[in-house]
Image (cartoon, rainbow, N blue to C red):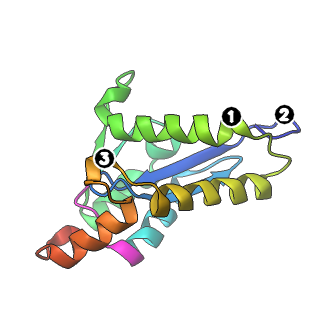
Amino acid sequence: MRADDRRFRILCVIDDFSRECLATVVDTSISGIRVARELDRIAEMRGFPCMVVSDNGTELTSNAMPQWQEDRQIEWHCIAPGKPMQNGFVESFNGRLRDECLNEHLFPNLRHARHLIAAWRDDYNHHRPHSSLDGLTPREYHQRSRENQNPNRANL
């Protein structure tokens, strides 16, 4: 929450394979068109995924998302309402972000929130080893898997 009691939203995009946080979009509102634009931006760097798993937030169930998914021929799976454990890793990530960053700061404005959340994301991706990744950071795991993996649709 900002110091002026205005709330903001965060779109977190996570790679389930590498546990890397690919984006944290911070704004007062986030439309489906904005989500599509962010997913395209990520795809320019990482390629398109084979599947996207999301909750049922309004920005993810808007008309823009089925069109984006259809145009790019990407499978889209929305978890069942009230079943966050169907997307357990993302829920765990969101809890960690909330506990370690959001609950620790009072943000005077969006710019400050974006700055601190980006710094937390950088630390998470580049400096925190994960036991589920054999002690590597998410970025290291992604780099190694890219070097050792046969090309497929997800990493072309």
Q: Are marks 2 and 3 in contact (CB under 8 Å)?
A: no
Q: Could you tell me which residue is drawn at 78 percent across and 58 percent down?
A: 111
Residue 18: which quarter of the image? Answer: bottom left
Q: Which mark is residue 5?
A: 2
Viewer-nearest residue: 143 or 131: 131
Magenta segment: 44-51
Tag 1 residue: 103
| Left or right for 156, reference 92 | left
Instruction: Report whether residue 36 is seen.
Output: no
Labels 2, 1: front one = 1
Mark 2 or mark 3, which is nearer to you?
3
Give the image location of residue 89, x and y in percent.
35, 39
Q: Dot 3 corresponds to which residue?
A: 131
C-alpha separation, residue under disc 2 versus residue under disc 1: 14 Å
Q: Secondary structure at mark 2?
A: loop
Mark 2 or mark 1: whose residue is earlier in sequence? 2
The mark lying in front, picked from 3 and 1, is: 3
| Residue 48 lies in the magenta-colored region | yes
Q: Specify the amino acid type for callout 2.
A: Asp
**Residue at 89% in and 38% down:** 4
